[in-house]
Image (tube, coloured by chain):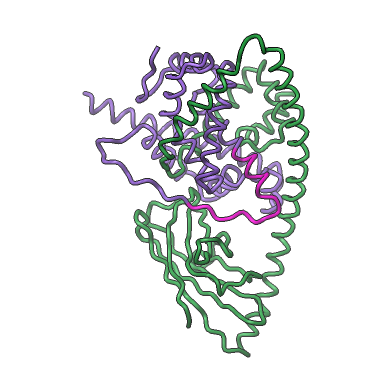
Chain colours: A green, B purple
């Protein structure tokens, strides 16, 4: 690979987005090219700092000794006399894992492309369904369920309102509007509609409209199951939360 | 040989720590865990959305670090950067494998309570610096990095979803990462400046 080719893909490399053969090509180049290595190191520092920004969660205290045990246990099996055997086993495993990994990657890639296409189709479909749905409100007695979304501690100034329109013969609709916190939340925000067990039934990103941040979807899911609504920021912190009213 | 479990490590100390890890020194394993166990676990919670996934990731990251320890070169980058890159790569691989065609579920993480100011730890200070750096980016840049780093979308997927030329996405990702790094370094300098002032 040339420096130009490497630099074109360096941000993706730093973010871990490349397929393994492409990443290996860049790594081979970085072994001998000091200029690209310097730039790659800088971009990786930027990526790593994203990793440090996430909410800190304390792991179970036993995790430390389990890791120490696993590593020291692994070492105890590393007897010099079995070195050749180990290398052979490792090489065989690596080849097997490589083959399985390549297959999984191909399947995952295909699925992701289908997923993007499906998202685009869903959005186009949403607009058509929304128009149909709004017309249908003229002819039926639909009672909206609603939730007032309250700011979680640390997110002063944030607020929101959610409306859910369940319907027997039509797709269900939800609308969530929100006001960002004064100074603490980090957009983009995402909404999740959860059932009693906390499992996500529907949800999506917010879009900026002239009236503020809005998330909506004409959903194929049964929104009558929705029990609560949570809005999270880009770090995964719950910014807003609200319980959905049972009726009207 | 013993290693300090708090305070910044010099590049030489990082190299010595990884040499000791490669040699199977248990004190080195525990030092590495005490410094980076929680950030790695927290990244796992954010990306994979479950304690089980985060624990598995943390174990795999430390195992990978031990296997690669002999190749670590502190002249090429900081230990924290190296370790978080390993963690992120493993987590993204897992995320892609598990997600398939399914729509990604919302992940929300309950942050641990803030410690008293006197007990502030390096990891929490680092987190605050990183957050301030992230807040310094434009909403569009944050959105782009969020799609790439937290959701594992490739540049091509971001381009297709947003209707943006692929080359533009790559350029914007690079620019956003550089801005993030610069803002993070500025935050670190500002903190060091305050500490120097207090020392005088």
A91 vs A108: above or below: above
Q: Nearer the viewer, residue B18 or B60?
A: B60
Residue drawn at x 30%, y 41% is B115
The residue range painted magenta reads B91-108
Q: Is residue A20 magenta?
A: no
How far across and how far down the image is residue B111, in percent?
40, 47
What residue is drawn where x is 50% and y is 45%?
A: B51
The answer to whether A141 appears left or right of A114 in the picture is left
Q: Nearer the viewer, residue A159 or A221?
A: A221
Q: Is residue A12 left or right of residue A151?
A: right
Left or right: residue B67 compared with residue B131: right
The count of marks equals 0
User: Which part of the image, by quadrant, shows the N terminus of chain A?
Assistant: top right
Residue A22, picture quadrant: top right
Q: Is residue B99 magenta?
A: yes
- Compared with B73, A151 (above or below) is below
Residue B75 spot, x, y in % from top left: 52, 16
Outermost residue toward the left?
A: B200
Q: Is residue A247 above or below residue B146?
A: below
At horizontal 49% and vertical 26% (from top left) the residue drawn is: A69
Q: Position of residue B89 (x, y in %)?
A: 61, 35
Residue A88's spot in the image, x, y percent? Answer: 74, 18
Residue B71 image-quadrant placement:
top right
């Amino acid at each position: 690979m040339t420096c130009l080719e490497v630099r074109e893909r360096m941000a993706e490399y730093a973010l871990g987005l490349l397929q393994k053969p492409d990443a290996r090509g860049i790594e081979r180049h970085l072994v001998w090219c000091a200029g690209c290595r310097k730039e790659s190191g800088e971009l990786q520092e930027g990526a790593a700092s994203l990793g440090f920004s996430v909410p800190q969660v304390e792991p179970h205290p036993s995790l430390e000794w389990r890791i120490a045990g696993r590593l020291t246990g692994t070492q105890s099996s590393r007897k010099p006399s079995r070195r050749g055997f180990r290398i052979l086993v490792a090489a065989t495993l690596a080849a097997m894992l490589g083959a399985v990994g390549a297959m999984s990657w191909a399947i995952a890639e295909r699925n992701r492309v289908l997923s993007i296409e499906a998202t685009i189709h869903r959005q186009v479909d949403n607009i058509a369904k929304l128009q149909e749905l709004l017309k249908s409100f003229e002819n039926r007695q639909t009672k909206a369920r609603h939730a007032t979304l309250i700011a979680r501690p640390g997110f002063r100034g944030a607020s929101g309102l959610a409306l859910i329109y369940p319907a027997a013969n039509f797709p269900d609709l939800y609308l969530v509007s929100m006001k960002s916190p004064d100074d603490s939340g980090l957009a983009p925000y995402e909404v999740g509609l959860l059932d009693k067990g906390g499992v996500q039934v529907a949800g999506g990103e917010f879009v900026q409209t002239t009236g503020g941040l809005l998330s909506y979807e004409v959903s194929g899911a049964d929104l009558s199951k929705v029990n609560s609504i949570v809005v999270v920021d880009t770090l995964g912190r719950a910014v807003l939360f609200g319980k959905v009213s049972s009726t009207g | 040989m013993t290693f300090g479990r708090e305070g910044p490590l010099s590049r030489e100390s990082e190299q010595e720590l990884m040499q000791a890890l490669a040699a199977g020194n248990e004190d080195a394993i525990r030092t590495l865990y005490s410094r980076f166990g929680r950030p790695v676990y927290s990244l796992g919670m954010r990306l994979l959305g479950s304690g089980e996934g985060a624990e598995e990731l943390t174990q795999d990251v430390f195992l990978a670090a031990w296997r690669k320890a002999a190749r670590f070169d502190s002249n090429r980058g900081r230990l924290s950067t190296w370790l978080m890159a390993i963690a992120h790569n493993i987590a993204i691989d897992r995320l892609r494998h598990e997600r398939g065609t399914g729509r990604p579920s919302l992940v929300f993480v309950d942050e641990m309570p803030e410690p008293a100011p006197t007990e502030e730890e390096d990891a929490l200070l680092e987190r605050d610096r990183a957050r301030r750096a992230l807040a310094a980016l434009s909403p569009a840049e944050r959105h782009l990095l969020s799609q790439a780093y937290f959701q594992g979308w490739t540049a091509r997927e971001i381009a297709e979803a947003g209707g943006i030329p692929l080359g533009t996405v790559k350029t914007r990702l690079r620019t956003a990462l550089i801005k993030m790094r610069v803002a993070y370094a500025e935050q670190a300098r500002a903190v060091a400046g305050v500490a120097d002032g207090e020392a005088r």
